[in-house]
Image (cartoon, coloured by chain):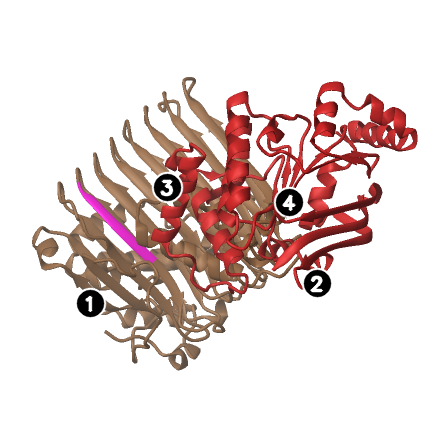
Chain colours: A brown, B red
Amino acid sequence: MTATLPADMQATRFDAAGFEALLAARPGEPAWLTERRRRSWEAFEAAPWPSNKDEEWMRTDIRLFKLDKFGPSLGAAESIVGEQPLLSNGVELGGRVEALNGVATLSELDEDLAAQGVVFGGLGEAVTCHSEKLEKAFAREVVSPTYDRFAMLNDACWTGGVVLHVPKGVRIEKPLHAIARMAGAGASDFGKTIIVLEEGAEATLLMETASTDAESAGLHNGTIEIVVGRNAKLRYVNLQNWNNRTWHFAHQKAVVGREGQLQWTIGALGARLAKVNQRVALTGADAEAQVNGAMFTQGKQHLCYNTHQHHEAPYCRSDLLYKNALQDHSRTVWRGMIQVDEAGQRTDAYQRNDNLMLAATARADSIPGLEIEADDVRCTHGSTSGRVDDTMIFYAMSRGYTRQEAVRMIVAGFFQQVFDRITIDSVREALGEAIGQRVQDLPNQ
Amino acid sequence: MSKTLRIKNLHVCVEGKPILNGVNLTINRGETHALMGPNGSGKSTLGNAVMGHPSYEVTDGTIELVDADGTVTNVLEMDASERARAGLFMAFQRPMAIPGVKLADFMRHATSNVRNPDRKEGEGLIPMREFRKELKDKMGHLRMDLDFARRYVNDGFSGGEMKRAEILQMAMLKPKFAILDETDSGLDVDAVKLASESIAEISADAAADGAMGVLIITHHDKLLERNTPDFTHVILGGRIVETGGVELAKELHNDGYDRIRAAYPEAAKLNSEMAEEDAVTV
């Protein structure tokens, strides 16, 4: 498989002609999908961009974002060798997918998994051979394609992302891995990822993003839709590691059925500006979701994560912990919401966000929220914000640590609480290392 | 090799307020010194200043390490890390918690730096097997469970656990000079006994090239039973007003500081002012 070169992207834009060019480049797609793309394109053309009058965009200014600097993926030209993935280091994988600028360049799955009916690959390619299965999955609209203008644009113009479908009772032991890369200024990665675990299925999926260089400004506009069936178990890791010039917009939602279990870990290190909606809905009794977030920001990065834990059924548990460390002039926004429907009796829900400020010029907004309609629930939330304490640094120095070593150790310790929850060694190590490298640049305060 | 820790005419301010007003103290390796004094007299300040706490501003005087050949090293020019690597150690009264960092990992890194003062960041640490063996041995002496080393540094430790962890670190770091700041407070009778035995042991075999010089800051004489001070110093109003032998420590423990206050009214007045300010800021 090959992918677009930067030069090709200069010509095409996200306009009517660009949209037609995208459709023309995808002749094998089923009719239902083309129709859906057209509907979403029309909705996109009619809709305004979100503005700071919208509650969830109040703290995230996108006036400097210009869509006409980017173009859709038309799937041509040659592939570029990218950096090694971080999450799969030393891991024996059951399958892997690689993509460049929203087009799959590699797709592998163990034969025995394929024989058991597991589907894993680039969604853009899978949609032609698994049309029927995917039409159903699309129709569920786990993420609403009309939620906002970014969702509409994604639904019309997506090319990348992966599909993972695990049939009833199939347990995948080895982790699956996917990496989406972007190369070249003006490149885009419009992913749509669909993960479905049927009843009793189990899987671990590690996904990450990477830019092939530090300078090129790219655009990611993605959606992730996850369905964890009855008594199914998914461990899902999503590491956002674009370069610091990339725009990252994403709508992500998981629906967890009765007795289903989801462990969802987010690592957010890259992007110039990220605006992510991460939602978990517990729709069957006794469902469980653990959400882990680790963010490290530097320079002038702005990362905004809106999380939502929706308890729609009784006896469900959700536990969210986001840990953010900020240096330089960077800023993070976390808005968390626990919503418990009237049906959500005996809910046990928790949300927490801790921020560690490594510079006086960084800023972290932390806004937890509760909306509870059931009367027999246990919902707690908390947020903390602290600086790297000088007396803590002195204590470590008095034991022979240099100042830099002390700061790096304290930051690592700060993240340990969230790392302790991550049950996948390679993920813990990759996140720890990536964060450690970033702290290296910390100046004396 | 440094032989002597020499403090001359030390003046220290905290947030602009003078706390030490000319302390003179010389500690040779192999000697045990007791430092006693009422609250607010400057005991902890002296320790923190020697260790290089950035909030303790040295406004006058010197702190020096003197080698056997007479070479003098200016401690005031070193940051806390360099002081630790030069062989200075302080067991803190209230050591800081470092959540998320396991005590064993913390000590392995610290020990690697102190034993190899030229170690650069990223260079190898003490081999894990070697470190673990030594740690296990030292913890056994202190009757500490090995699980303890897997807990986060001082995070949720009881008072006694913190003090023990400080002694353990001293045992691993094998300093040349150690300041023990009320290491006996918060310990029950048995724990004090164990602590004082350990200190004596560590002190004796601290370094291949000679025993530790120890400065014990305390209100009680228990810790001193097995660490008989060669010298006892009384600090009042930020100045050492009297120096004696072990009998002075016993006297202060039994009779308190009334005789001292009466003998040095000016320092006593200064001390009560400082203690009052302490009370206000708390």
| The C terminus of chain A lies in quadrant | bottom right
Distance between the alpha carbons at the discs numbered 3 and 4? 28 Å
Kindly indicate whether the residues beneath marks 1 and 3 are on one polypeptide chain: yes
Q: Chain of mark 3?
A: A
What amino acid type is highlighted by mark number 1? Gly
Q: CA distance from mark 4 to mark 1?
A: 64 Å
Mark 3 is on which residue type? Answer: Arg
Magenta stretch, overall SS: strand
Label 1 packing within 10 angstroms: few (<14), some (14-19), many (20+):
few
The answer for how far apart the CA atoms under marks 2 and 3 are is 55 Å
Gap in angstroms between the C-alphas marked 4 and 2:
34 Å
Circle 3: element type:
loop
Q: Which mark is drawn over residue A421? A: 3
| Labelled disc at residue A28 | 1
Q: Secondary structure at mark 2?
A: loop
Spatial separation of the CA atoms under disc 1 and disc 3:
43 Å
B282 relative to A210, above or below: above
Nearer to us in this view, B151 or A308 = B151
Question: Where, by quadrant of the figure, is residue A110 drawn?
Answer: bottom left
Q: Horizontally, is B111 left or right of B80 in the view?
A: left
User: Marks 1 and 3: which is nearer the front?
Assistant: 3
C-alpha distance separating marks 2 and 1 = 87 Å
Residue A391: mark in rendering: 4
Kindly check if marks 3 and 4 are in contact, taking CB atoms under 8 A apart as contact.
no
The location of residue B105, given as percent across then percent down, is: 44, 48
Q: Nearer the viewer, mark 4 or mark 1?
A: 4
First to last magenta residue range: A201-207
Mark 2 belongs to which subunit? B
Q: Chain of mark 4?
A: A
* Residue A14, horizontal then vertical, whole percent: 43, 68
In the image, what residue occupies the spot 17% across and 51% down?
A133
| Sooner in the amino-acid sequence: mark 1 or mark 3 | 1
